[in-house]
Amino acid sequence: MSKNNTGIENSGNRNSGNLNSGDRNSGNRNSGNRNSGNLNSGDRNSGNWNSGDCNSGDWNSGNLNSGNRNSGNLNSGNRNSGDCNSGDRNSGDLNSGDRNSGDRNSGDCNSGDWNSGAFNRDCPKMRLFEKELDMTVQEFYSTHDLYMDLPLSVWIDKSYMTKEEKSENNSWETTGGFLRTLDYKDAHRKWWADNPADHDRFLELPEFDWTIFTEITGIEKDTVVQPKTIEIGGKTYEVSDDLTKALKDLKEL
């Protein structure tokens, strides 16, 4: 026997919506559970007519889709049987273009991978620093990592705030500073300064070109940080900035 329903004609339990055979639905006519949408046989959908779970879109048999009519998962686009597509009608995965059976395409109608054009069956050559390499995009990314965890903002202490920043941020006296939003190039420069161990990942890229790199990222050649070293017992060791500061404070006995 159904119980604890505030809605009407529910055979399920704890429904605030109406005509639900499932449980804990705030929407209507759901056979699934915990749906705020309507007519879902799946669970936890805010969209409608879903047989999959956790969809905010409609008519999905897959899961976690914000788009519509997807049988795949995690799609923001529509009518995808693949996963993680922002484009439409893809059977492949991670496509921003449409009608791709391959993966990671920004173009349309490709059965190959990593294409920005259309109707391609292969994977294109990688272009780096305006030159074409003798390797495909897929081959390049299997051996190289271009990821930078760019900071979106940085904490600025009140003693380093400008007059304009203080006038625009009324809470700086209470908080002792504020979060400064970094633009695209400032974020790159900040990441570069904070991660000297990652420099070689970029400096050793095929066809590396400082002029192009600087124009795009704002990182300049003279900002390459040379590691600090210390010699102990005839051997040279790389040391961090914190250790360098601590060593300066040592007193001779």
Image: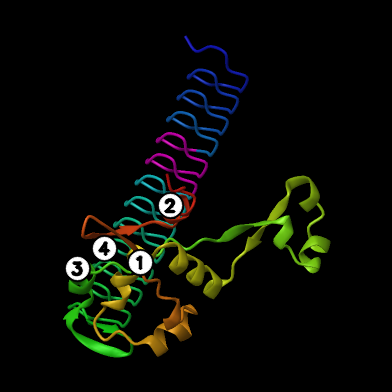
Q: Residue at x 29, y 75 (%)?
A: 109
Front residue of 194/226: it is: 226
| CA gap, disc 4 and disc 2 | 56 Å
Q: Residue at x 51, y 32 (%)?
A: 29
Between circles 2 and 1, the one closer to the viewer is: 2
Of callouts 4 and 1, the N-terminal one: 4
Labels 4 & 3 near each other (Cβ < 8 A): no
Query: Residue 125 sits in which quadrant?
Result: bottom left
* Mark 4 secondary-structure assignment: loop
Image coordinates of residue 172 in percent, x first then y, are 77, 52
Which disc number belongs to residue 247? 2
According to the picture, the residue beneath numbered tag 3 turns out to be 143
> Label 2 sits on what residue type?
Leu
Between circles 2 and 3, the one closer to the viewer is: 2
Of callouts 4 and 3, the N-terminal one: 4
Of callouts 2 and 1, the N-terminal one: 1
Front residue of 122/126: it is: 126
According to the picture, the residue beneath numbered tag 4 turns out to be 92
| Residue interval drawn in magenta | 39-56
